[in-house]
Image (tube, coloured by chain):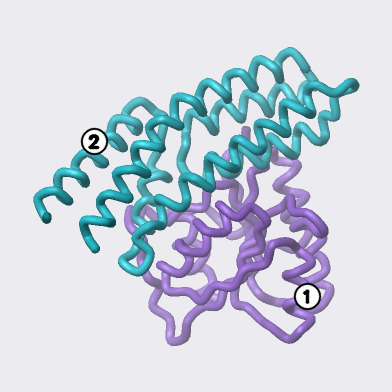
């Protein structure tokens, strides 16, 4: 099993508690996840971080949202989903010109699997579970862009 | 009323601390528990039954898949990742580790290893389940005292 992989460097945050990131406007987040339990946890977590959250149950729903004119600052996407997985969804979104930060959140932890997911166009990729430290790192990185 | 709620909270804390000390739950569970808000006090009491349903359904599918000949290890892989994901997301540490054992057996296409690992997952889930039921009961009683 490999250690956590990130697209933008090492996590140095040692925050023990959740912090609301200070931004002028609410960060909009699209959570792309087919598992209802994980959807619920991620949605409540991201809301508690002060972001505005929308859900998509698979990659196709995410792509369709962008095709309908929606936009999000951040996309948190699972890898394995029915209809369209995270790799295909990320490739399509990037080919559509979507420049949102896209972060993979997956149960897969083998180096080759993470690399394959990253190659689709992710900014970063985490192995589940998504926790306060990882969310803080992502939102701080987003704030710095 | 406040004293009763306090006593219930202490009971809940003791159970969670004990499970954490045994390595059955980890800090992810504490984080998930902290997501409970005033406008959704039943958050954990709703989440735990969802989790249990997830695990039971996926275990059933895993059992069906391993019993077929030949074994479809691709399907086993996907189902293993599914159960691994939800167990780690809720902070069920020992159960998540048991899922890793299953993943290794699936990756090695070792049917006997898979069967053994599935038995391990079932045992860990049974150990966890009774404590989770107690946590849900306490959560509901705490919320009813707050109402």
Horizontal relation, residue A6 to residue A86: left or right = left
Q: Position of residue B32 (x, y in %)?
A: 41, 51
- Residue tagged 1: A64
- CB within 8 Å, label 1 to label 2: no
The chain letter corresponding to cyan is B
Q: Is residue A55 above or below residue B65?
A: below
Q: Are marks 1 and 2 on the same chain?
A: no
- Residue tagged 2: B14
Can you tell which quarter of the image residue B101 is in?
A: top right
Horizontal relation, residue B103 to residue B137: left or right = right
Q: How many residues crowd around disc 1 within 10 Å: few (fewer than 14), some, or many (20 or more)?
A: some
Tint applied to chain A in the drawing: purple
Q: How many residues crowd around disc 2 within 10 Å: few (fewer than 14), some, or many (20 or more)?
A: few
Q: Is residue B113 above or below residue A88?
A: above
Q: Position of residue B8 (x, y in %)?
A: 20, 44
Disc 1 secondary structure class: helix
Instruction: Return the residue nearer the eye: A103 or B105.
Output: B105
Q: CA distance from mark 1 to mark 2?
A: 47 Å
In this view, the mark in front (1 or 2):
2
Horizontal relation, residue B50 to residue B66: left or right = left
Residue at the image point whose x is 45% and y is 62% from the top: A45
Q: Is residue B24 above or below residue B78?
A: above
Q: Position of residue B131 (x, y in %)?
A: 38, 32
Residue at the image point whose x is 34% and y is 31% from the top: B19
């Amino acid at each position: 099993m490999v250690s956590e992989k990130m697209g933008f460097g090492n996590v140095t945050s040692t925050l023990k508690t959740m912090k609301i990131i200070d931004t002028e406007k609410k960060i909009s987040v699209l959570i792309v996840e087919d598992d209802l339990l994980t959807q619920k946890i991620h949605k409540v977590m991201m809301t508690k971080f002060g972001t505005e959250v929308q859900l998509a149950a698979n990659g196709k729903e995410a792509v369709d949202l962008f095709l309908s004119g929606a936009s999000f600052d951040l996309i948190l996407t699972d890898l394995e989903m029915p209809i369209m997985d995270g790799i295909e969804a990320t490739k399509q979104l990037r080919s559509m010109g979507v420049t949102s930060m896209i972060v993979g959140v997956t149960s897969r932890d083998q180096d080759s699997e993470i690399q394959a997911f990253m190659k689709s166009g992710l900014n970063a990729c985490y192995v589940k579970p998504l926790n306060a430290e990882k969310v803080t790192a992502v939102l701080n990185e987003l704030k710095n862009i | 009323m406040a004293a009763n709620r306090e006593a219930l909270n202490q009971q809940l804390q003791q159970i969670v601390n004990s499970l954490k000390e045994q390595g059955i739950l980890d800090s992810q569970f504490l984080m998930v528990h902290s997501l409970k808000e005033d406008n959704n006090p039943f958050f954990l009491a709703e989440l735990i039954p969802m989790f249990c349903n997830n695990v039971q359904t996926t275990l059933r599918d895993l059992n069906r898949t391993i019993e077929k000949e030949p074994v479809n290890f691709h399907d086993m892989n996907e189902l293993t990742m599914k159960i691994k994901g939800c167990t780690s997301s809720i902070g069920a540490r020992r159960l998540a580790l048991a899922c890793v054992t299953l993943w290794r057996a699936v990756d090695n296409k070792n049917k006997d290893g898979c069967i053994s690992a599935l038995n391990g997952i079932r045992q860990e889930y049974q150990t966890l389940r009774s404590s989770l039921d107690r946590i849900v009961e306490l959560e509901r009683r705490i919320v009813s005292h707050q109402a």
